[in-house]
Image (cartoon, rainbow, N blue to C red):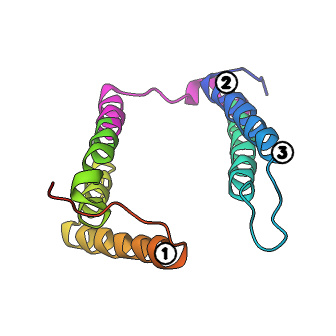
Amino acid sequence: MKFKINWDVGIGIGVVVLGIFILILTLGMPKSPLGLGPGDYPRIISYGLIITGIILIIQGLKEEPSKQKIYSWNSLKRVIFLVLLGLFYVYLVHYIGFLYLTPFLMLSVMYLFGYKKLLWGIIISILFTLLVNFIFYNIFKVPLPVFSLF
């Protein structure tokens, strides 16, 4: 088997380096005597980044040159639309609120990635939004953006 460095390997190395950087930054954060401290969540994310980066490197090294993915213009348009949709959501969530705007974002993203069942998409979007709202607002006590007319 011939190993060839491709985009997957390069991006995997970048993800591993980012994960190590975040891990190093979190080592200096204070520890909590009880429960989770301020550095625990970023540390968990950094472990996940390192693991997924290593998996991406291994897959990229094993991949045959003939099986390399060629990305089409349609997939690039979807990514650009997803980024613009995210920016639009971040701008509008302050005015419309998390509870009212998030189901539309979720439904749009599901449709963008090929989910065509409209009724189930609406139900999943609403239920997931309510679940996230309940968890963050009632359990974590994180205030989410609310509707504001002015």
Residue at the image point whose x is 81% and y is 74% from the top? 34
On screen, 72 above or below 52?
above
User: Judging from the image, what secondary structure is the residue with disc 3 in?
Assistant: loop
- Nearest the camera: 8 or 108? 108
Q: Which mark is residue 28?
A: 3
- Nearest the camera: 55 or 126? 126
Q: Earlier in the sequence, mark 3 or mark 2?
A: 2
Residue 93 drawn at (x, y percent): 29, 53
Which one is closest to the eye, mark 3 or mark 1? 3
User: Judging from the image, what secondary structure is the residue with disc 2 in?
Assistant: helix
Q: Amino acid at mark 3?
A: Gly
Q: Which mark is residue 135?
A: 1
Residue 127 drawn at (x, y percent): 34, 76
Q: Which residues are magenta?
A: 61-83
Q: Is residue 133 left or right of residue 135?
A: left
Residue hosting label 2: 10
Q: Amino acid at mark 1?
A: Ile
